């Protein structure tokens, strides 16, 4: 819980600090890039679609997924009106843990669970559940649907375009 609390506290400080949108996005990207295990998330999201792919193609997907996931998560944080974070519990089993939190805004409150894994340099989030809906599973459903209609290369091109599109200020 301590690692999650530290990251969310710093996230809050960045969101409420003076500065322009681009500065906040950069600061949140740096902070969350070290907290989120986007490789584990990307492998969960793509599932069987990575099997048999050349290592370079897998690395390419994981890099694009990392940029897309962190960008999406950062933009969501910036949409909240001065979010506060509450901590409702943690469950640790060996080298995995689940940290239960709440995002509290003046208008709403909802649960966010972080599935964590212990790595050499501390704890990293391997999935995020918002109101019990897994972001990894959500991406997997989207990727499954997309790959039923288009090639892996076409999906990668669409993901690259999303990552390189200009950012939209949240405020």
Image (tube, rainbow, N blue to C red):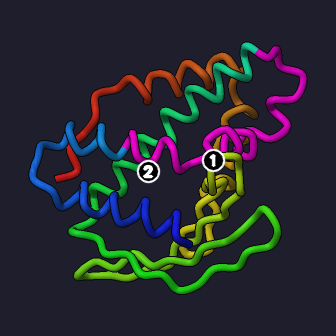
Residue 165's quadrant in the figure? top left
Observer-nearest residue: 49 or 37?
37
Q: Nearer the viewer, mark 1 or mark 2?
A: 1
| Mark identifier at residue 96 | none
Residue 43 to residue 16: above or below: above
Residue shown at the point (45%, 69%) measured from the top left: 5
Which residue is the site of mark 2?
Answer: 73
Q: Residues within 10 Å of mark 1 (few under 14, many from 20)?
A: few
Disc 2 on helix, strand or loop?
Answer: helix
Residue 54: x %, y % from top left: 82, 14
Residue 14 to residue 53: above or below: below
Observer-nearest residue: 57 or 89?
89
Task: State the extent of the magenta-drawn residues as a range.
Answer: 29-55
The quadrant of the rendering that contains the N terminus is: bottom right
Which residue is the site of mark 1?
Answer: 121
Observer-nearest residue: 150 or 120?
120
């Amino acid at each position: 819980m301590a690692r999650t609390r530290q990251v969310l506290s710093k996230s809050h400080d960045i969101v409420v600090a003076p500065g322009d949108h681009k500065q906040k996005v950069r600061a949140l990207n740096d902070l969350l890039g070290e907290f989120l295990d986007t490789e584990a998330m990307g492998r969960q999201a793509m599932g069987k679609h990575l099997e048999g792919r050349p290592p370079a193609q897998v690395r390419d997907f994981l890099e694009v997924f990392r940029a897309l996931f962190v960008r999406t998560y950062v933009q969501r944080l910036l949409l909240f009106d001065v979010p506060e974070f509450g901590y409702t519990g943690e469950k640790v089993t060996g080298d995995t843990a689940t940290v239960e939190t709440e995002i509290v805004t003046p208008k709403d409150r909802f649960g966010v669970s972080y599935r964590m894994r212990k790595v050499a340099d501390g704890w990293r989030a391997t999935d995020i559940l918002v109101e019990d809906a897994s972001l990894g599973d959500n991406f997997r459903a989207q990727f499954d649907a997309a790959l039923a209609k288009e090639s892996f290369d076409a999906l990668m091109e669409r993901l690259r375009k999303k990552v390189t599109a200009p950012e939209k200020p949240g405020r």
